[in-house]
Image: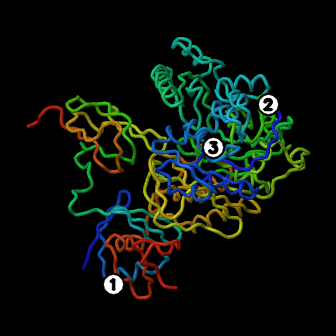
Amino acid sequence: MKSVRLRHRGETRDIRLDEGARQIGSSPRIVTAAAGDRIFVWCDGVTHSFERVRASRSGSGGEHGGDLLAPMPGRVRKVAAAVGDPIERGMVLIVLEAMKMEHAIRAPKDGILKRLLVKEGDLVDAGVELAEIGSRAPDG
Amino acid sequence: MTHDSRLITRLLIANRGEIAVRIARTAREMGIETVAVFAESDAGALHVRHADRALSLGVGPPAETYLSVPRLLEAARAAGADAIHPGYGFLSENAGFARAVGDAGLLWVGPPPAAMEGMGGKLRARAKMEAAGVPVVPGSRRGIEDDAGLASEAGRIGFPLLIKASAGGGGKGMSLVERPGNLPAALAEGRRVGAAAFGDGTVYLERLLEGCRHVEFQVFGDQSGNAVHLFERECSVQRRHQKIIEETPSAALDGALREAMGAAAVAAARAVAYVGAGTVEFLVDREGGFYFLEMNTRLQVEHGITEETLGCDLVRAQLEVAQGAALPAAWRDGSLRPRGHALELRLYAEDPVDFLPRTGRILVYREPGGPGVRIDAGIALGSEVGVEFDPLLAKLIVWGADRDAAIRRGRRALSEWIVLGVETNMPLLRAVLDSPEFASGRYDTGLVGRLPPGAAAPEPPDAAWIAAALAASGPQTPPAGAVAVVSSGPDPWEGLAGWRAGA
């Protein structure tokens, strides 16, 4: 018996696939499409999008608060800090641009810029890691 | 200006997406050959397939392709085009391009460059409107150079206020200042954005009018000096200061206000000797006061709702006026009356809750149909939606005998529309149509922000979770009574990795 973990916005569910699941899933009019781990479901006139959560990935990121993930796909317009720089919560670290819109990514906490994974001009997908903020002082 | 009355035989459409398709359709009906242009990344785009010929603008970002005047003129020459339609966006409001098109001996399907320049800078446009007796939003009459001058000007205008880039538009280059202390930082930012995005750091101040509606009038002029308005479009359903749903007529206008605003819109067009299609945008406050906001010197995205209620083709009128024709008699003699009600719903490739852009490939696509439903789409099955262009994918335009009928039809059409592979704002469009505030007709530009939490991200039913899990788990044996989907094809029911209940 197979199980699939899915996320829809804040909610994560494990769906067990057996004949019963198939019966439930076949009742309304449904159309689905999968693009990698992104799953789109049109169900009775309403579209829902899901993300498949793979067991190999440890949650998809940001759990310890230091990872900066791209909230949207786009081109890196500006990188405003370098590795080793002290970081203050709220300061703009990276500016992404997509579809004629700029989006500033701000530091979620104080610290130092531990890793920087993109440079200006890079094209990134939504959800990829852009940088990591480490603790300012080694705290033991 | 000189009266131009040449016939267009081959039209180059200097745009992409739904508007390029829209223009090609009318041109074809008129017997005009069409030439599409495309950036290499767009070689498979829908607009390319709607033209008689298509020419590559080469590889590169928009600045080197759809925004490149030399490449566009070279394409026009190579294709033997005798006219250029710019669509909206890109170079449509660039007077330099309009002039270059004329200098190359081609017809420009748009207003004269001088009219574009007259309305191009917001400050200049405000001054022209005041001189023509059209009310403008209270604010500064000149660009502010120094911070001290700015502070005293701000004190005169009052807080909260907006700092606007004179060269801005479309909700860009605008920032809100709630308190005097925030002024210097906002000013610096406004100048930076103005210079970076529009090549002009001139900013000015405008009083923030709250609880307003955004209502615009379609205007049209011809080369003989006629200027008319073609009624209003209500554009108050916005996110990030950009429109997502428009309707006509506006529930905010009564006969007297419509007449006054229409007259002001025509005065605005006359003030710059306008020719062709244009739009005069106003803010309307709760007391029925109205203020000039800006004039868009091009065809508007939402022109389709005007077409549906008036039974006309604005692109055809643009092409005829460019060829020297006078405006239709029915437009000039005051007998024109809108019929019924029309809504436009803009489908954007973006998250329906935080409005951030989304990309991908259209894997399943089915358009709605039936009475009173029109789709102007720039996408089809297999289309790639990338980060370099506008997020507008398609427009659903519905017509009904009255407002309620149009809203019901919009809801029905949305429920038929299947777009999978790229996340879209469709749930937000549905949430607006379902909201009591929208249904009441009494709403303002704050409507989207007042939707109940979660309205634009409905909880998936169990069946949707299960279907998603089945799709995620890869090819599977279809359940009894279900039809397996084996390939992707033009039939949207033949999506990828899916199945449906058997009929």
- How far apart, in angstroms, are the residues tagged by discs 2 and 3? 28 Å
Q: What element carries label 3?
A: helix
Q: Mark 2 points at which residue?
A: B273
- How far apart, in angstroms, are the residues tagged by discs 1 and 3? 61 Å
| Disc 1 residue crowd, few under 14, some 14–19, many 20+, Cα 10 Å | few
Can you give x and y, in whole percent of width and height, for residue B497 in the image?
Answer: 39, 73
| In this view, the mark in front (2 or 3) | 3
Instruction: Name the residue nearer the viewer: A3 or B290.
Output: A3
Can you give x and y, in whole percent of width and height, for residue B358 in the image?
Answer: 44, 52
Name the chain letter of the residue that bears numbered label 3: B
Identity of the residue furthest to the bottom in this view: B480
Name the chain letter of the residue that bears numbered label 1: A
Instruction: Give amino acid for label 2.
Output: Ala
Q: Name the residue under label 1.
A: A19
| Among the 4 quarters of the image, the one containing residue B150 | top right
| In this view, the mark in front (1 or 2) | 2
Instruction: Give amino acid for label 1.
Output: Glu
Looking at the image, is B183 positioned above or below residue B465?
Answer: above
Q: Name the residue under label 3.
A: B76
Looking at the image, is A98 positioned above or below residue B118?
Answer: below
Q: Which of marks 2 and 3 is nearer the N terminus?
A: 3
Q: Is residue B307 left or right of residue B36?
A: right
Instruction: Name the residue nearer the viewer: B157 or B418.
Output: B418
Looking at the image, is B218 positioned above or below residue B456?
Answer: above
Is residue B366 among the parts visible in the rendering?
yes
How is the model colour-coded?
rainbow
Instruction: Give amino acid for label 3.
Output: Ala
